[in-house]
Image (cartoon, helix red, strand yellow):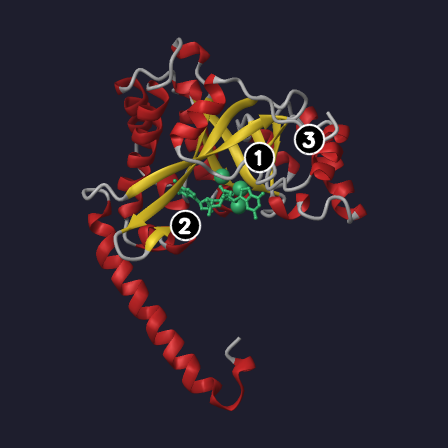
Amino acid sequence: DAKERGRNGFRFYTQDLNSRTFRHFRLETDLGGAIEDDQLRLHYQPKIELATGRVVGAEALIRWDHPRLGMLPPGQFMEIAEDMTLIEQIGEWVLQQACRDLASLPGTAQALPHIAINVSARQLRQPNLAEEFFAITEEHGIPADRIELELTESVIMDDADTAARVFQRLREVGMSLAVDDFGTGHASLTQLKQLPADTLKIDRSFVMDLEKSHEDAKIVRAIVVMARSLDMQLVAEGVETDAQIHLLREFGCDYAQGFRYSRPVAFDELREMIVNDVRMLPESE
Ligand code: C2E
Ligand code: MG
Ligand code: MG
Ligand code: MG
C-alpha cells in the first residue's frame, strides 16, 4: 500500500509507521490498566446445531472498550498482551467472566450451554494452567466440561509436545478441547489422533467460497469424514450464507458459527436466545 502512493510513498510510509508505533506504544501503556478499570468485555457468538438450528453454546470473544478509541477487536491488542505477559491475567479474566455469565443463567448446572474460550500460545506454556482454570470453574460452581478451550492448529503444531501434555491435563480436570482454525496448520493425522481433542473447527477460509469452489467443497467433505473417524465433533466457522448452511448440512457437518446466524453479541442477547430456545434455520424452512 505504501507503493501505491506514488513518489511521496516513502515519506507517507514513515509517517504511517510512526503513527502505528505511537498507537502501539499508547495501547501498551493503557492495556496494563484495562482489567482494573473494567474495560474488557466478552462478546459471545452462538454455536448452532446445523440440523435443528438450536443454540447449543457460544464462543467468548474478547473486546477492549477503550475510553478514547472505542471498542477494539482482539486483533488490535492481543498481540501486545501476548508480548507483555499480560496475556496470563487477561486469560484468567476471560474465564472468570465467562463463568460469571454462565452462573447467571437459569436452570441446573448440568443444563448449561457450552462456552468456548480462546487460549493463546503463551498461555499454553503457563505452568499449572489446568489447575488454575479448574479452580476458577469451581469457584463459580460451573462444571468443568461446560468450558471448551480452543487452541489454533498452528499454535498446537508450533509446540506439539507441550500442547499434547497440556491437553492431557486439561482433559484430566474435565475441560473440553477444540482445535481452532483447522486446515491452516498442517497437523498430521497421527498428531491429531494423539491429541485428546473433542472438537475440530474448520477454518473460515474453507467455508467462505464453499458454493463456488469445488476444491473447498472437497476439502470440507474430507474433513467431515476425518472428524467422524477420529470421533470428533465438527464446527464450521464463518458461515455467511444459506447456501453454505445447506452444503454443510448435506456434507454431514454437526455445528456452525457465523454472521449468517449471529455476530458476536453481548451476553444479555445470548441469554435471550437460550432462554427463548430460538431456532435459526435457513430461509425456505
Ligand atoms: P477465532 O477464535 O478464530 O474467532 C473467530 C473470529 O471470526 C472472530 O473475530 C469472529 O468475530 C469472526 N467471525 C465469526 N463469524 C464470522 C463470519 O461469518 N464472517 C467473518 N468475516 N468473521 C466472522 P474476533 O472476535 O475479531 O477474534 C479474532 C481472533 O482473536 C479469534 O479468532 C481468536 O483467535 C482471538 N481471540 C478472541 N478472543 C480471545 C481471547 O479471549 N483470548 C485469546 N487468547 N484470543 C482471543
Ligand atoms: Mg476461536
Ligand atoms: Mg477460528
Ligand atoms: Mg480465526
Q: Residue 18 occupies which quadrant of the picture?
A: bottom left
Mark 2, ligand 1, within 8 Å: the answer is yes
Q: Secondary structure at mark 2?
A: loop
In front: 242, or 214?
Answer: 242
Location of residue 20 in the rendering, given as x and y in whole percent from the top left corner? 36, 69
Of the residues under marks 2 and 1, which one precedes in the sequence? 2
Q: Please report the residue visible at 43 percent of the width from the left and 16 percent of the height from the top.
A: 112
Pick out the residue farthest to the bottom. Answer: 7
Q: Residue 123 occupies which quadrant of the picture?
A: top left
Q: Using the rendered image of the protein, determine whether residue 28 is visible from the camera's viewpoint.
A: yes
Q: Please report the residue visible at 41 percent of the width from the left and 45 percent of the height from the top.
A: 121
Report the quarter where the C terminus lies: top right
Return the residue at label 2.
73
Q: How many marks?
A: 3
Give the Cα separation between the discs numbered 3 and 1.
13 Å
Q: Assess disc 3: are there few (<14), some (14-19) or many (≥20) residues with their C-alpha within 10 Å of its C-alpha.
A: some
Q: Please report the residue visible at 28 percent of the width from the left and 19 percent of the height from the top.
A: 140
Q: Secondary structure at mark 3?
A: loop
Return the residue at label 3.
282
Which numbered mark, 2 or 3, is in the foreground of this view?
3
